[in-house]
Image (spheres, rainbow, N blue to C red):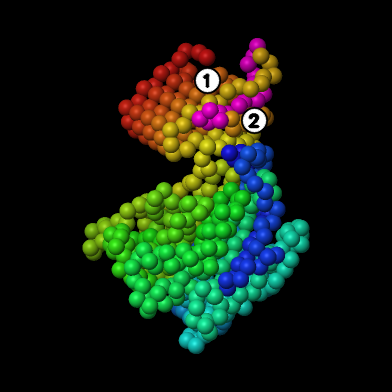
Amino acid sequence: MRFFALLGSTARPRRSYRAFCGGQRRPKLCQSLGVEGLEGKTLLSANAYTFAVIGDYGADAIGGAANEKAVADLVLQWKPDDIITVGDNNYNDGGSSTIEQNIGQYYGSYIYPHPSSAVESNHFWPATGNHEYKNDGDTQDPTPKPFVDYFQWLTTVGDAAQIANVTPPRVLNVAKAVPNQSDNNPDNNGLYYSYGAGDNGTGGPLVQFVVLDTEIWVHKVQLLVAQGITNGSDVERAIEQTPQAQWLRLLLSESRATWNIVVGHHPAYTNATSSQDTYWNSSDPKDNNYAGNNPWMQLPYKSWGADALLTGHVHAYNRLMVDDFLYIVNGAGGAGGPDLTFDGNGNRGTQPGTAAKFSGSIYGAMLCTADVSSITFKFMSTDAKSVDEYTLRKQNSASVVGSELIVTGSNARDVIFVLPSAWTTARQRVFSAVRVLINGRSMGTFSGIDHISVYGLNGHDRIRASKVGISLTIDGGGGHDLIVGGRRRDVLFGGLGNDWLIGYRNDQMLGGRGRNRVIRLSRP
């Protein structure tokens, strides 16, 4: 189990990095720096980490200056620790003459090195998109060469271990990788890398980003189709065997980061109507009905260890939960739209799993906040009219956040007990420590806390903290829950389902939806 906590910090977060380019492993570069195992460890402190996500944004050179500037102003106003892109950074032809116009003039303060930047390490992390591969329109050499030349940290080989000891750490340890198309084999090409950011309290990264080059998979699919391989399942299996996919799988299996976020350009699922990247006859109705879906991007990310996939390519915003895994498409950075079909518009409805979708003249970006207990993805349009927010929480865990204990169950049926472990004055029942049990397993003993928050999530949960003399906030979440508060002034939420809430006269008890029973006791 993982125990974790959060402390705010204004310092730039710690990072660890891995790199893998063009099918070749870099021994010094592909080691994780200072990352220890999390299982069974108690995390006593960790720094919050914020990052912005933009996609399909580099449109100044094609008449999109106003939209791109509005998005950039929004992002820079947030002052995130890092900026992540999901591709199509440099419209229209990925050229060297437009890259500063499309990227640097807006986000140069986050790029290292850059004339307008005062930072001592890079804080701008781009993924390649299909427009980067146009290489100034050079059809004989369709590689993202201007992209690699512009981001100089991609062209410097450094000793990863040595760089990690620099304060602040210098992010110059990713090897140069210009894909070589001469052999027409995408398995030997590609620009993909990973890096870790934030501090999870054990010397490891709070978030590990795995940045893919999905355009080489488009090239792979085209070759497969030319060979007569057009069945969706066969294409998916072929992609899983590519060097990039195998690298991704290995990287996720070895990760000790709290959160593992996969970043790429082409979406796996979307409500888009575009069919430009569909090269096969899929037998899956969910792919035939939504031509913007890319089955070759539907890898088993969750079973491999990822928490979410962030992509772009579709000039809109789309959040989906498919097979209990989070997919976010954010291509609303300024290049234009719309690319989504809404209910009642055309012959396509809503992609199963869709939770949010914004299209039309919608431009915006995401502000994401991660700590060791949760990661929140928030999209906001430049006009502030379209907002979407979603939070992932670590399941079956307990942590101390400042002076607050956070306990989180799972989406299954849980039995959660918060019990007094020690007390300073037995007569006054002033407890100095509490113990947490989830499904009979001890999550540890915690002291120095003045508030406890418990999240049951989904499932029919039993949450009990009746003997604890510390104020509580308990949210049962979905399912039919039994919640018993403590001896102080508590806040109890039943959430969805038919719940029982048992508290005392000073408690706030809200049953939520369903048929609820609220029992208020006179005194502890």
Q: So how many labels did they put on this image?
A: 2
- Locate the N terminus by quadrant: top right
The answer to which of 348 and 1 lies nearer the viewer is 1
Q: Position of residue 247 (x, y in %)?
A: 56, 63
Dot label at residue 446: 2
Q: CA distance from mark 2 to mark 1?
A: 17 Å
Using the image, determine if residue 510 lies above or below residue 372. Answer: above
Segment colored magenta: 427-441
Amino acid on which disc 1 is placed: Ser
Using the image, determine if residue 53 lies above or below residue 421. Answer: below
Dot label at residue 466: 1
Query: Residue at point 45% right, 74% down?
Result: 220
Query: Residue at point 43% right, 33% down?
Result: 413
Using the image, determine if residue 192 lies above or below residue 455. Answer: below
**Residue 494 appears in the rendering:** no
Dot label at residue 186: none
**Residue 181 appears in the rendering:** yes
Query: Is residue 306 in the magenta section?
Result: no
Q: Is residue 163 left or right of residue 277?
A: right
Amino acid on which disc 2 is placed: Phe
Mark 1: few/some/many CA within 10 Å (<14, 14-19, 20+): many
Query: Residue at point 44% right, 20% down?
Result: 502
Badge 1 element: loop
Query: Is residue 432 in the magenta section?
Result: yes
